[in-house]
Image: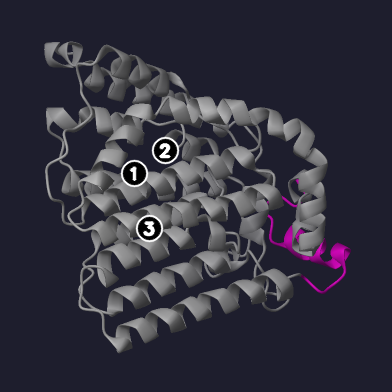
Amino acid sequence: MNLRVWENPWRLMLAVNAAVLVGVFLHKIALPPFVPYIHLLVDYHYGFTKRALIGAIVSLFTDKVPVWLVFALAGAVWLVTLALFVKLFQRTFGFDDAHWPLFIFIAGSPFFLKNFMHTLGHFDIYGCALTIVLLLIPARSVLYVLIAALFSILLILVHHIFVLMYVPTIAAIVVLRFYLMQRVMPRNIAVGLIALAAVGILFLVAQFAGTVEVPYDEFIRHLQSRMADPSRTDLLQFGYIWYQPLSKEFADTWARMPSNILGVPVFALLIWLHAPLWRYFTRLIGALANELHRRIVFAALIMISAGYFVMFVTVFDYSRWISNWAVCTFLMLHATKMLPASKDVPPIPSDDRKTTIFGWIVTLIPRVGIVRPF
């Protein structure tokens, strides 16, 4: 390792993060991919079905789905997301020495790429990747709104919970990058409202009309017929998901609430460890040239957080939700940086002892988890 890396602890943190990621990956691929695998089996064989888009796409290329495809597909998407984020950060902030702490607190956060590695095969990362694309492409015409709507529709077809997970962030980015920066015309507003209505209607259809109507045993036999190794029936134990009504999800979540709520202090601690990042974000908002822009950014963050609160009381994958909430906040930080500012905002100090300690702690935490912390 060269002298420059040793002299700059933030570069060393990057190397440690890479090593941690390798460890998380090796641990992950040793575990059976119960939920991710079954999602590759479910398609539109019985008509419109929630959570079936990815499986339907896979069925176009192969009749038999091997287990390793979960990790191959998810790993490819993870690498694409990493590349997209690096491009976004480079374009928004650059990779000069002054911005290394910011990069570490975001890219090295246990909420972000490391947790996406731990949840390899889950579809959360698709929302992140498409949102980053929206931050990278030009937002000069109403076509941008239509692309955002298309992304939202695709995400809801992948999993209807995206309507709360990433669609609010997508909507906020459209407002910040298009409606605040371009001339607002009645046509643009109408397109936005129609797109919003279409996304909302699709969510309702997926939520309430996307359950499988055939008997459960028949559904499982169909999934088994698509398996490369039909003897692995243990991987089909989550087939009930496609039959479970919203009321049952509520009941299960609240039944587990007393034990799962114990993880909240840990989540709060993890959020606090990112304090230098939150302070920088606050200064970034305060430096915006337009008071209206500041208010809209705050309102957007509240809207995004409200969506995650609804998820918290509905489905109990709390570690995933808090991690994706943080990721949405990271992406909103980039969107905010793209707005006109009245003054420069000093970066996170790289020589502050407390900030460096927080950076090391964030670096060494390998993940947040899926349900409970770690």
Is 59 in the magenta?
no
Q: Nearer the viewer, residue 149 or 30?
A: 149
Q: Which residue is mark 3?
A: 131
**Disc 2 to disc 3, C-alpha distance:** 15 Å
Decide if residue 257 is on the left or right side of residue 37. right
Q: Residue 37: percent from the left, percent from the top?
A: 64, 50
**Disc 1 to disc 3, C-alpha distance:** 13 Å
Q: Residue 333: percent from the left, percent from the top?
A: 31, 47
What's the image's color scheme? one colour
Q: Quadrant of residue 294?
A: bottom left
Q: Which residue is mark 2?
A: 113
Q: Which residue is mark 1?
A: 82
Three-letter code, disc 2: Leu
**Disc 2 to disc 1, C-alpha distance:** 7 Å
Q: Nearer the viewer, residue 348 or 7?
A: 348
Q: Nearer the viewer, mark 1 or mark 3?
A: 3
Callout 3 environment at 10 Å: few (<14), some (14 to 19), or many (20+)? many
Q: Residue 207: percent from the left, percent from the top?
A: 68, 69
Q: Nearer the viewer, mark 2 or mark 3?
A: 3
Three-letter code, disc 3: Thr
Q: Are marks 2 and 3 in contact (CB under 8 Å)?
A: no
Mark closest to the chain's N terminus, 2 or 3 = 2
Callout 3: helix, strand or loop?
Answer: helix
Decide if residue 328 is on the left or right side of residue 233. left
